[in-house]
């Protein structure tokens, strides 16, 4: 399970952060494990992302995720990749302004796509999604009506 919450700081910035993790109403037979905590600035979780060609990785198996996204839904694409990888993203049956993650497709009537690996897009501007090392992709959506979203990437070895 992934829990996410924004923290807003004073204009001078954050000097230190202390986290206290508490679990309530957990049955005595259950176990709670905190495995990863990621803190970073900005509105989308990305982490450090390297160019796959620069770090000498090679493409591995393909991963695909798809579903129907209603307006305002936050998309979480589960991944356990060993290395960061650029993703391809497509929207279908969209009408009106579309933003998924930090990529702004603009006014779409029908379909649009962006390919992070090849640096191409049919509409819009921004950064194509990136699956980061050992992290799930978390994408905020801005849609006028529901649309079909397709994500794919080549795992990097």
Image (cartoon, grey):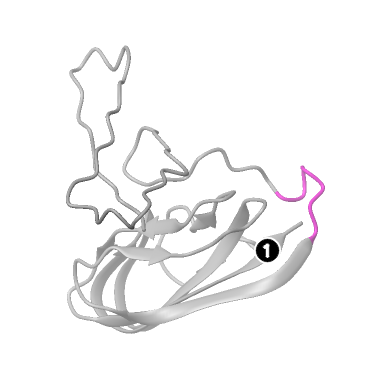
* Quadrant of res 59: bottom right
Q: Residues within 10 Å of mark 1 (few under 14, many from 20)?
A: many
Which corner quadrant holds the C terminus? bottom right
Looking at the picture, how far across and down is residue 72, in whole percent?
Answer: 19, 66
Residue 155 magenta-highlighted: no
Q: Residue at x 23, y 81 (%)?
A: 146
Per the picture, the main secondary structure of the magenta-coloured stretch is loop
The range drawn in magenta is 52-58
58 left or right, relative to 34: right
Secondary element at image label 1: strand
| In-front residue for pair 90/97 | 90
Q: Is residue 55 above or below residue 89?
A: above
Residue 45: name its quadrant.
top left
Residue visible at 31% across and 12% down in the picture: 15
Residue 134, x across and y down, in percent: 57, 50
* Residue 99 at least partly seen: yes
Asked whether residue 121 appears in the rendered view, the answer is: no
Give the left or right position of residue 49, taking residue 3 as reference: right
Q: Position of residue 36 (x, y in %)?
A: 46, 42
| Residue sitting nearer the eye, 18 or 39 | 18
Name the residue that disc number 1 marks: 155
Quadrant of the image containing the N terminus: bottom left
Residue at screen point 22% across, 77% down: 70
Examine the image and state in which quarter residue 8 appears.
top left
Would residue 55 be counted in the magenta stretch? yes
Q: Position of residue 131 (x, y in %)?
A: 54, 56
22 lies above or below 86:
above
Residue at the outermost front position:
28
């Amino acid at each position: 399970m992934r829990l996410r919450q924004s923290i807003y700081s004073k204009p001078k910035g954050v000097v230190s952060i202390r986290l206290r993790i508490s679990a309530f109403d957990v049955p005595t037979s259950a176990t709670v494990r905190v495995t990863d905590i990621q803190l970073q600035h900005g509105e989308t979780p990305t982490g450090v992302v390297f160019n796959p060609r620069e770090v000498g990785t090679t493409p591995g198996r393909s991963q695909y995720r798809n579903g129907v996204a209603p307006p305002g839904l936050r998309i979480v694409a589960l991944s356990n990749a060993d290395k960061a990888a650029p993703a391809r993203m497509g929207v279908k049956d969209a009408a009106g302004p579309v933003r998924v993650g930090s990529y702004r497709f603009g006014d779409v009537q029908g379909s649009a796509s962006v390919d992070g690996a090849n640096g191409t897009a049919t509409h819009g501007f921004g950064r194509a999604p990136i699956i980061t090392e050992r992290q799930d992709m978390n994408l905020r959506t801005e849609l006028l009506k529901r649309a079909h979203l397709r994500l794919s990437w080549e795992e990097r070895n």
